[in-house]
């Protein structure tokens, strides 16, 4: 699990996107660079003057149960190096640069290149009602589309108001739906129907469903199967010779592929899932081939290689919209160093593509459910080695502050629904959010602090008379302000927290579930599957998160089929009750936390 000092809410085994960086400097031998990258994966936070634990790639692969990793590095418009690590399957052959992986959601920006080719050739328009192009199926009209129609631009930028975040795929032996059945949510499809439930163009919300509508548009417009058309229009011209959108992967090519693994190191039953949702998740490829896609984009921008798209079209593709989303890839960086990026997560596969518009890039592909965490560690090591300005480890310098000033920060700080406790022990102060574990706050100045465990910073603000009045937590590009409680309120909050901590410690020691947690979890799962959650039984932040994630949660939980059994496994160190939940078509570990009045405050789950 990823450490966090922020509130933990829904954690979905879906998309993980990691942005990217700038160009490399050629100075030392490439092999030496590779060895430095893989022999010391740095932590996210470094403390100046203190040695940091930097394990080897092989050690992290073993710890995270990721059998294989493949990496391709881009420099100066070419693939500078490509290397495989580990094995395609436990007891199997080594991963090589030619080993195939499922690209998962990186299928989307590659598919978008094909869609934009049709736009460029005048066969489609980005801002026309998509129902004018759809023949085999029409997007159902409703109150949200009466005045604003859904457009292709909105589909490609996740702003169409469409449902269905991602797709679970189909295990070996399961019937495979047609694309129209996926769009309608008809059996044997294991995902919900794709429909509009928000005014088009008003918000950014990731929707794999939107890309399946785009896939249907391509097929209806060209009259060709999507894999053939993409091969002839994009994959072939770009030089992605190993890649295919065929689903399932042809039997005679399975020997080229890495097999998928769960987070606990067990193989995905039956091997790779089949994804008829090809535009959203169906591309089989290698890091080198994805690097060729990235290089084509980079070179097309300057008119050096326009095999698929013109300079003008590529510029439009990389123009950020809502949530920095381009027409396919995500975008980021600065005006001087913009980048494009996408990540992906299929059953047993995690991967990332990062490339600067004019600079270097890297593609990382893995065959394990924990590969996203590993990829972020590899990215830090790559960024450090090539001196990228972003995504290197963050280094902080610790100072010796005025002890009287630091001592004045001790107290209780309020923010609904959690409180932040600052305590002192000798010359050190510690912070604790709610019932999360206590972390030392290390000073960068008299009023600015950080923690080593996660990338989070803290600023204490005074009332003008030298007394701390507020604490601001900076994390994940957001700020949360906590107001200092007065002495009377602080004592009440502290007494309540102490009583809860005592009860928590007792529950952890006795491994006894909180009253009502199993019933709350059962009720929540069944309500989510019906699409009718009772938000009054949730804490306000958790209710808000559930509202926003409901289409994705419903699709994921419905895909596992009917709830069968819930078995209590124990109480985690943070007080979350752990349950093993068995469904008709899958199994997962759920962790649930309740508020003192019995409302659901957080849920995490991991498929097994």
Image: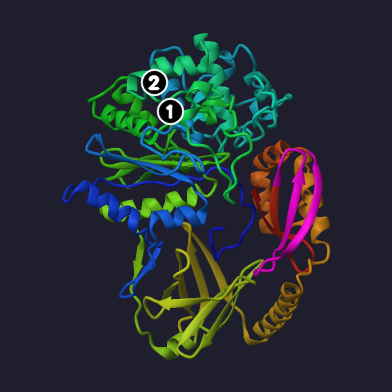
Q: Is residue 396 magenta?
A: no
Quadrant assignment, res 297: top left
Count neighbours of disc 1 (C-alpha within 10 A) and say few if under 14, some if 14 to 19, many if 20 or more. Answer: many
In this view, the residue in front, 192 or 148, is 192
Quarter holding the N terminus is bottom right
Helix, strand or loop status at disc 2: helix
Helix, strand or loop status at disc 1: helix
Q: Residue 268 bears which disc, if any?
A: none
Residue placed under numbered mark 1 in the picture: 110
306 displayed left or right of 549: left
Q: State the CA–CA distance, disc 1 to disc 2.
A: 8 Å
Q: Are marks 1 and 2 in contact (CB under 8 Å)?
A: yes
Residue placed under numbered mark 2 in the picture: 234
In this view, the residue in front, 266 or 151, is 266
| Residue 60 position (above or below residue 164) | below
The segment highlighted magenta reads 562-587
* Magenta residues, dominant SS class: strand
Percent x, y of residue 181: 68, 21
Q: Is residue 331 visible?
A: no
| Residue 401 position (above or below residue 91) | below
Percent x, y of residue 146: 66, 25
Q: At 45% across and 42% down in the image, what residue appears?
A: 87
In this view, the residue in front, 413 or 253, is 253
């Amino acid at each position: 699990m990823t450490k966090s000092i922020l509130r933990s809410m829904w954690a979905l085994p879906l998309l993980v996107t990691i942005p990217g960086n700038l160009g490399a400097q050629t100075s030392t031998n490439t092999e030496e660079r590779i060895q430095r990258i893989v022999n010391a994966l740095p932590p996210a936070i470094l403390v100046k003057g203190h040695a940091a634990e930097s394990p080897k790639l092989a050690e992290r692969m073993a710890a995270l149960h990721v059998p294989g990793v493949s990496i391709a590095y881009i420099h100066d418009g070419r693939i500078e190096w490509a290397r495989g690590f580990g094995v395609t399957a436990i007891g199997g052959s080594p991963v090589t640069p030619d080993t195939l992986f499922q690209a998962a959601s990186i299928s989307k920006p590659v598919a978008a290149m094909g869609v934009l080719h049709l736009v460029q050739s005048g066969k489609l328009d980005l801002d026309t009602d998509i129902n004018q192009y759809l023949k085999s199926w029409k997007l159902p009209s409703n109150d949200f589309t009466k005045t604003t129609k859904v457009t292709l631009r909105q589909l490609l930028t996740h702003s169409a108001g469409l449902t269905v975040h991602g797709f679970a795929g189909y295990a070996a032996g399961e019937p495979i739906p047609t694309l129209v059945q996926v769009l309608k949510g008809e059996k044997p499809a294991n995902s919900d129907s794709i429909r509009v439930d928000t005014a088009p163009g008003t918000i950014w919300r990731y929707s794999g469903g939107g890309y399946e509508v785009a896939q249907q548009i391509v097929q209806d417009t060209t009259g060709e199967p999507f894999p053939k058309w993409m091969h002839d229009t994009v994959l072939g011209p770009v030089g992605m010779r190993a890649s295919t959108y065929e689903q399932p992967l042809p039997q005679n090519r399975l020997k080229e592929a890495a097999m998928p693994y769960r987070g606990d190191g067990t193989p995905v039953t039956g091997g790779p899932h089949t994804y008829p949702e090809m535009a959203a998740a169906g591309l089989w490829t290698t890091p080198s081939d994805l690097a060729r896609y990235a290089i084509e984009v980079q070179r097309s921008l300057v008119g050096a290689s326009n095999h698929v798209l013109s300079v003008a079209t590529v510029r439009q593709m990389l123009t950020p919209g809502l949530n920095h989303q381009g027409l396919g890839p995500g975008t980021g960086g600065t005006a001087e160093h913009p980048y494009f990026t996408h990540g992906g997560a299929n059953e047993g596969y995690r991967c990332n593509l990062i490339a600067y518009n004019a600079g270097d890039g890297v593609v990382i592909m893995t065959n394990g459910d924990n590969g996203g965490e590993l990829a972020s560690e590899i990215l830090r090591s790559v960024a450090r080695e090539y001196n990228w300005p972003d995504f290197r480890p963050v280094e902080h310098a610790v100072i010796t502050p005025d002890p009287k000033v630091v001592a004045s920060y001790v107290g209780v700080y309020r923010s609904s629904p959690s409180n932040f406790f600052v305590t002192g022990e000798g010359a050190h102060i510690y912070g604790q959010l709610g019932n999360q574990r206590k972390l030392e706050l290390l000073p960068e100045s008299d009023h600015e602090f950080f923690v080593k465990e996660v990338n989070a910073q803290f600023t204490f603000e005074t009332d003008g008379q030298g007394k701390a009045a507020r604490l601001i937590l900076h994390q994940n590009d957001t700020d949360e302000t906590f107001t200092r409680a007065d002495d009377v309120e602080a004592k009440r909050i502290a007494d309540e927290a102490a009583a809860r901590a005592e009860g928590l410690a007792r529950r952890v020691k006795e491994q006894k579930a909180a009253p009502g947690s199993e019933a709350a979890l059962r009720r929540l799962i069944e309500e989510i599957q019906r699409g009718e959650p009772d938000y009054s039984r949730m804490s306000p932040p958790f209710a808000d998160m559930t509202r926003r994630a409901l289409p994705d949660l419903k699709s994921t939980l419905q895909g596992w089929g009917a709830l069968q059994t819930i078995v209590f496994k124990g109480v985690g160190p943070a007080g979350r009750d752990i349950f093993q939940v068995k469904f008709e078509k899958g199994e997962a570990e759920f962790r649930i936390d309740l508020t003192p009045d019995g409302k659901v405050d957080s849920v995490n789950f991991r498929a097994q």
